[in-house]
Amino acid sequence: MTWSDPDPGVGVFAVDSVDRLLRPFARVRLAHLPTPLDELRRLTRATDGPRLFMKRDDCTGLALGGNKARKLEFYFGQAQQQGADTVLITGAVQSNYVRMAAAAAAGLGMECHIQLEDRVADMDEVYRRSGNVLLNRILGASIHSYPQGEDEAGADRRLEEIAGELRSEGKRPYIIYLSADRPPLGALGYVNAAAEILSQLEEQRLVMDHIVIASGSSLSHSGLLVGLRVLGSRIPVTGVCVRRNATLQSERVGHCTRALENLLNLERAVVVPEDIRVYDKTFAPGYGRLNVAVIEAIRLLGGTEGILLDPVYTGKSMAGLLAMIRAKQFEKTRSVLFVHTGGTPALFAYESGLLQP
């Protein structure tokens, strides 16, 4: 089934109606869109598997690019709508999200306070000062630290405390929350990305049999899945776990898709439980941790296509795709689209691990 063949059991919108679906939400244009959708011919030959393609969301611009630019368009839209002059966000030490939030704030003339959580223990000094951390400082962000790595509610509470301090100074802060209990505003960016992908498939006369994407906060994964289904596409989407195991991530994606459907005021659910696919065979030893498969994936894509992957998200999700190909989960006659979500600056923070023989 091609993307344009709607499933009669799904409420279907025309691709150009996604703008109408998203119109109620304030938005600031931050990303260079559309991003390319390219074929990976050399990687396909090297893996001797399905025909491989890549959605280049590492090319969104905004301080070296990445998927977060799509999400931040809606958060900064709401921030400006509310008259905010300062944005607060929390993430891991090498978070791409906070780096791009700092860039967006700088470009819009707003202050940015970023909170770096200690999610990855026992990392060297290069990890704590290079990569995204260096860029945060260049972009002029105020940096705060949070000692916990797996306490989303606590990290959000600390942001609220900082916001209170800023209000006492006469600032008008806006918080980009981490917890899944908040409305998934950022996922709207990937509802829009789904329409973009489907349009590109039509333009290039391609039929895609599967999409693979990193699944962490699940906003990109869930937004893409809801966007495809609301447009009538049944292309399966597999999220490769980068933050938590498959059981926990499935729950996270399910929660986020339901919240997104509510946010969009859909009359009924478009995502069914069978749509939620996650893969965690390349997740160990955990978030932000290298393994042999990740290093191999980074070197393979670099050596075959001249494309850089990061150690935390795209390296791990490409490792997952390669493992699925080796397990013969895709027939050679099929086509698979890998979503490159960016994250290149983190490569420099993992220098010691990546240079091991």
Image: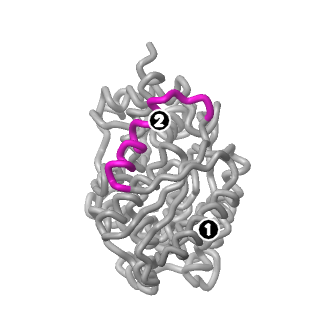
- Element carrying mark 2: loop
Mark 1 — residue?
160
- Counting every numbered tag in the picture gives 2
Q: Which stretch did the figure color magenta?
A: 121-140
Task: Locate residue 253, reporting x and y percent.
Answer: 63, 59
Q: Is residue 213 visible?
A: yes
> Vertical placement of 272 versus 337: above or below?
below
Residue 100 falls in image quadrant: bottom left
Label 1 crowd (10 A; few <14 / some 14-19 / many >=20): some
Q: Is residue 321 visible?
A: no
Residue 299 falls in image quadrant: top left
Residue 147 image label = none
**Residue sitting at x 67%, y 68%:** 181
Q: Which amino acid, mark 2?
A: Pro
Mark 2 — residue?
311
**Residue sitting at x 35%, y 55%:** 140
**Residue sitting at x 50%, y 39%:** 312
Viewer-side residue, 353 vs 101: 101
> Vertical placement of 144 versus 161: above or below?
above
Task: Locate residue 22, reporting x and y percent.
Answer: 44, 80
